[in-house]
Amino acid sequence: MEGKLTEKYMDQLEQWIDTVPKTFTLLFAITRDGCDPVTFHQKCDNQGATVTVLYNQHGSVYGGFTSISWTSKTGVYVKDDKAFLYQLKYSGRDNFNIFRVNSPDGAIVHNNQFGPLFGSGYELFTFKGRINRSENIFPLNGSMNQSGNTYNNQGMTANQINNGTMEVTELEVYMVTDGERKKKIEKQLSPWRKIKDWNEKFHDDLKEKIVNFKPIQGSNVSEARFVMLGPVGAGKSSFFNTIDSIYRGRITQRAGSGSSEHSLTTAFVPYSIEISSGATLNFRLCDTRGLEESMGIDVLEGNYLLDGNIPYYYEFNPTRPITPESPGFKSDPTGNDKVHCAVFVIDSTSLEVLSTKIVEKMKGLRGLMNQKGIPQLILLTKVDNLCEYVEKDVAQVFYSTKVKEAVDKASQLLGLPRANILPVKNYENETELDDNVDILALLALRKMLHCSEDFMLNMKHREKDVEGEMGKLKLEK
């Protein structure tokens, strides 16, 4: 088993430890070995310098380093003037912080009943006794005490490091030794999805084809309608902002986006794209309330949404779901009101930690869509956070093995074909447009339009067949 620690994070830890090149060898991982102090000590005692790495469901990565071997002694405070705590990532974003030791005499605590324990004040106490996994989470019974007594906390609280929780998806311990490491190859020589050359012409061709999109003739539809569904913070609103930015020629923020415990979008909002000529493109991206375990769209509201019964700008109310008696309810929706393609938006860095309840909600909605013949896609966002090559150059996305693995996981998660999983990187931190970011978003939008065309064609033939059957019945009478 290879560990989760990326080359970029190894590089950063290497700089913090000293200037000599380092190799990192995985000794212990709770997903592989179980979360038990007995196993931890069996695998990690007397191994020299080690780094402990914790990963949580919020996309944060943090831990501690000691230059002294772990032992199975009981309640022994160990001096280590090279020890430190650190933060590598916070809520999905790289955030490099080192917390150097203030009081070396109590830098590490050795105890055969505990997992890794840093600081006489238990500044990073991982776990005591055996911890059983609950679904994909290990609820560690330790704590993070940023008192600043043993380690210099730089004024940061535990909430700013581990989101205020000791629940983790993984805990790893690596042996750290001197030596030049052979870096893992994280991209393929040939793309895993066939693409054209990414250049200015391809960029402009994609933009033009989307501008020229028109619904299938005879389908009684004047614009394609896409519904965006997904967990809170996955990037539904940000995807619209990205498409809007491409056609406005600057970064825009028409749709509210950002991070929050609950969905920032509370209404059913149809967004249209206007180009420089003033014309409006023939599709709408419909934003919805984010899916949550106890809130968000349920199957009944999902059914109304797909059938076109829910009016634009309807405010979703968890305590009072929409009914046919609700104001504005469309009892006789037109072809334009119906959803022509459903798009699940999922954060690629959260695939392993998505709650079972939210996955079941998405699968329930998928069941409705299948009954209605509505095509479904997944927008896999934040792919630049998966791979350092993609972070540096979005055009490398189809060469990245990390992105390919995420596409495979998303495909398995909801049972959709891999061709229907579309990696994207939304505009988030940028102040200027980037052609490669544009191309990736436009490729996704083109696929969405193709799927809507397929649905409209089926709808057109279905209506013709129904008319034909009705005509036959009249003749027979």
Image (cartoon, grey):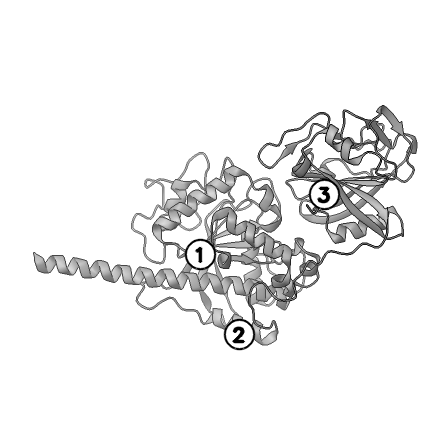
Could you classify mark 1 by the number of other residues whose Cα lies within 10 Å: few (under 14), some (14-19), or many (20 or more)? many
Residue 450 in the image, given as x and y percentages of width and height: 43, 64
Amino acid found under the numbered disc labelled 3: Val
Q: Is residue 280 or residue 405 the one in the foreground?
A: 405
Q: Quadrant of the C terminus?
A: bottom left
The answer to whether marks 2 and 1 mark residues whose Cβ atoms lie closer than 8 Å is no
The residue sitting at the top extreme is 74
Q: CA distance from mark 1 to mark 3?
A: 35 Å
Mark 1 or mark 3: name the one nearer the start of the chain: 3
Q: Which residue is mark 1?
A: 226
Q: Residue at x 35, y 45 (%)?
A: 329
The residue sitting at the left extreme is 477
Q: CA distance from mark 2 to mark 3?
A: 41 Å
Residue 389 seen in the current view: yes
Q: Which residue is mark 3?
A: 61
Q: Nearer the viewer, mark 1 or mark 3?
A: 3
| Label 1 secondary element | strand
Could you classify mark 2 by the number of other residues whose Cα lies within 10 Å: few (under 14), some (14-19), or many (20 or more)? few
Residue 423 in the image, given as x and y percentages of width and height: 57, 58
Amino acid found under the numbered disc labelled 2: Asp
| Label 3 secondary element | strand
The answer to whether marks 2 and 3 mark residues whose Cβ atoms lie closer than 8 Å is no
Mark 2 or mark 1: name the one nearer the start of the chain: 2
Q: Nearer the viewer, mark 2 or mark 3?
A: 3
Q: Residue at x 9, y 60 (%)?
A: 475
Question: Quarter of the image holding residue 403?
Answer: bottom right
Mark 2 or mark 3: name the one nearer the start of the chain: 3
Q: Which residue is mark 2?
A: 205
Left or right? Give the position of 357 relative to 128.
left
Q: Quadrant of the N terminus?
A: top right
Q: Is residue 32 or residue 319 the one in the foreground?
A: 32
Q: Is residue 91 or residue 112 the one in the foreground?
A: 112
